[in-house]
Image (spheres, rainbow, N blue to C red):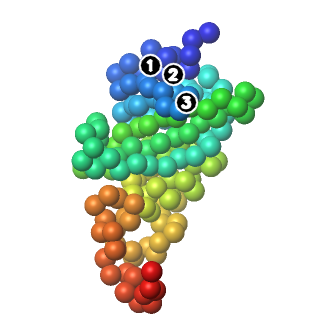
């Protein structure tokens, strides 16, 4: 039986940027264009029935294919096997299709990524901030967000170290 990530690479050769391993876990790097088809295949044909986590990474100035990537950590409940999928998203158009139709866990995690990184999820049933006020300016987990914020902490008392 062919490895699931090799199966994805075979079927979506134009979308796969690479397969690598880190800490004993295989990882698939892909373009965002056909992300739903790839995720659906991993779920329906390869048995990755749980979206264990969905997050993002900002690779600002790190020489990656794009500045951002959305990270999907998938699990097979039956075997406990895990895999990671990274879908690269460009800074000029930080948008990717929503996985909310595939896993019930996706909408909340996608809202968090939207709130903290500014990556929009096409087709999300209610994309809005989840941690910060709607009027908040910026996305604090982006690497170019000021370390001390943009003045939003001025009302808080300072504590001596």
- Left or right of 22, for residue 51: right
Residue shown at 59%/36% (left/top)?
A: 74
Q: Which residue is mark 2?
A: 5
Q: Which residue is mark 3?
A: 25
Image quarter hosting the N terminus:
top right
Say which of marks 3 and 1 sits in front: 3
**Sooner in the amino-acid sequence: mark 3 or mark 2:** 2
Q: Which mark is residue 86?
A: none
**Is residue 24 in view?**
yes
- Distance in Å between CA atoms under marks 3 and 1: 17 Å
The answer to whether residue 51 is above or below residue 18 is below
From the top left corner, tell me how far across and down residue 70 is, in percent.
43, 44
- C-beta proximity under 8 Å, tags 1 and 2: yes
From the top left corner, tell me how far across and down residue 152 is, in percent.
37, 81
**Secondary structure beneath label 1:** helix
Q: Quadrant of residue 103?
A: top right
The mark tally for this picture is: 3
- Distance in Å between CA atoms under marks 3 and 2: 11 Å
The answer to whether residue 40 is above or below residue 61 is above
- Left or right of 74, for residue 70: left
Residue shown at 37%/64% (left/top)?
A: 139
**Secondary structure beneath label 3:** strand
Q: Which residue is mark 1?
A: 9
**Secondary structure beneath label 2:** helix
Q: Residue farthest to the front?
A: 161
Image quarter hosting the C terminus:
bottom left
Q: Residues within 10 Å of mark 1 (few under 14, many from 20)?
A: many
Residue shown at 61%/41% (left/top)?
A: 51
């Amino acid at each position: 039986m062919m490895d699931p990530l090799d199966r994805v690479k075979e079927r979506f050769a134009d979308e796969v940027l690479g397969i690598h391993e880190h800490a004993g876990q295989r990882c698939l790097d892909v373009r965002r264009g056909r992300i739903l088809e790839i995720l659906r295949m991993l779920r329906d044909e390869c048995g990755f029935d749980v979206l264990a986590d969905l997050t993002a990474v900002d690779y600002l100035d790190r020489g990656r294919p794009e500045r951002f990537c959305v990270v999907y950590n998938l699990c097979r409940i039956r075997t406990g096997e895990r895999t990671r999928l990274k879908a690269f998203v460009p800074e000029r158009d930080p948008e990717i299709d929503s996985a909310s139709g595939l896993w019930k866990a996706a909408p909340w995690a996608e809202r968090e990524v939207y709130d903290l990184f500014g990556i929009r999820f096409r087709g999300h049933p209610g994309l809005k901030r989840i941690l910060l006020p709607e009027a908040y300016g910026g996305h604090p987990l982006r690497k170019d967000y000021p370390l001390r914020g943009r003045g939003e902490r001025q009302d808080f008392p300072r504590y001596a170290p």
